[in-house]
Image (cartoon, grey):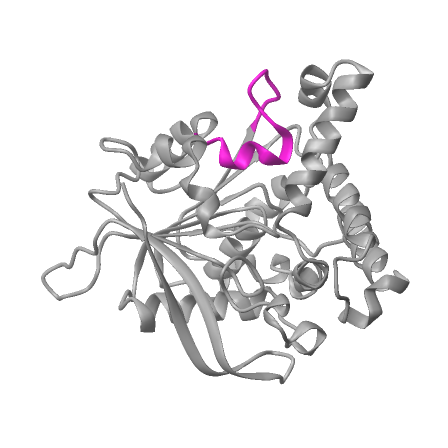
Amino acid sequence: MVPRADDFIIRDFLFNSGDRMPELRLRYRTLGQPLRDESGAVSNAVLILHGTTGSGAQFLRSSFADELFQRGQLLDAEAHFIIMPDGIGHGGSSRPSDGMRMNFPRYGYLDMIRAQRRLVSEGLGVDHLKLVMGTSMGGMQTWLWGIHYPDCMDYLAPLASLPAEIAGRNRMIRKMIMDSIRLDPAWHDGNYVEQPPSLIHAIHLLLMMTSAPLQWRKEAGTREAADAFLAERIRSYASTLDANDMLYAFAASEDYDPAPRLSRIQAPLLAINSADDQVNPPELGILEAAIKRVKRGRFVLLPIDEHTRGHGTHTLAGLWKHHLAEFLVRGDA
């Protein structure tokens, strides 16, 4: 199972901010081959969308790919054409750290899904998707796909997300991340030579935002273990993240508010969250109320157990794939 990686170039891309880019690059990976029906339309395409600061490459990890893409699995790559793009500002797609820095156009989730749509339709010749699914930011974008392109898919499966404006604690942490970068004198309005110290402060906040208290206590049950655990997580994030990219990525959620238009979703939708998700805590009750406005919507809340990992449960496909399998068989609420 070897993925194919390529770039799709969109000429003269107009952002919702009014900014333009002469060439917007979207990096993407695919598994499998498109199959066409009698009319010539691709019938087996699956679009999978990643989270903030991530990339489509994360779905090639064993915890996801081995559970879904192997022969005989739910999204067997021999039977499906799996599309995993890097969102604008992420991975190998065009992003501020390429050189434009703070001159990079301001982008939002609506720009990101519009670019994804053009990749799928213009770049890959896919007019209809069997399934659109995503994790975290990708889950939020899955809700937006259902609203803005309601006839473009058979099924929707957002994971680790809420169909509501980013507010409350979620917004506060995002703003703290952005402010920690903007207020750092070493940031120099984005024109730094080396990563400013605020990148580490932003990583600290990101770690708290996505933490899993029960599992972290088990994995780091002593002071020494906790310090080592934290140091390794910081090192891992700092080796791949850029302050400007991070600033843009968190600001991108500011145009996200699907709640008023949930009734536009036509495809059957399965939302999956976990009870220990600190980003989308179940006690808010947002999803339980919102799913009632989705015509063919279902909601599954995974209980906390020894295997869940808080917000990160979204990429442990073995914990929820049976729910997705049942949903794809039933096809409705």
Q: Can you give x and y, in whole percent of width and height, for residue 60 in the image?
A: 40, 41
The answer to whether residue 83 shows anywhere in this view is yes
Looking at the image, which residue is at 74% across and 40% down? 209
Asked which quadrant contains residue 190, the reply is: bottom right
Q: Quadrant of the N terminus?
A: top left
Looking at the image, which residue is at 71% across and 26% down? 229
Q: Can you give x and y, in whole percent of width and height, for residue 312 in the image?
A: 59, 35
Looking at the image, which residue is at 71% across and 64% down? 244
72 displayed left or right of 190: left
The answer to whether residue 295 shows anywhere in this view is no
So how many labels did they put on this image? Answer: 0
Is 206 placed above or below 107 here?
Answer: above
Residue at the left extreme, as displayed: 38
Q: Can you give x and y, in whole percent of width and height, for residue 283 in the image?
A: 73, 33
User: Of 49 and 190, which appears nearest the observer?
Assistant: 190
Task: Give the magenta range.
Answer: 302-317
Asked which quadrant contains residue 110, the reply is: bottom right
Q: Quadrant of the C terminus?
A: top left
User: Of 152 and 229, which appears nearest the observer?
Assistant: 229
Looking at the image, which residue is at 9% across and 61% down? 38
227 displayed left or right of 33: right
190 displayed left or right of 27: right
User: Of 164 and 266, which appears nearest the observer?
Assistant: 164
5 displayed left or right of 26: left
Residue 111 covered by magenta stretch: no
Q: Can you give x and y, in whole percent of width and height, for residue 20 in the image?
A: 57, 84
User: Of 212 and 40, which appears nearest the observer?
Assistant: 212
Is 161 placed above or below 213 here?
Answer: below
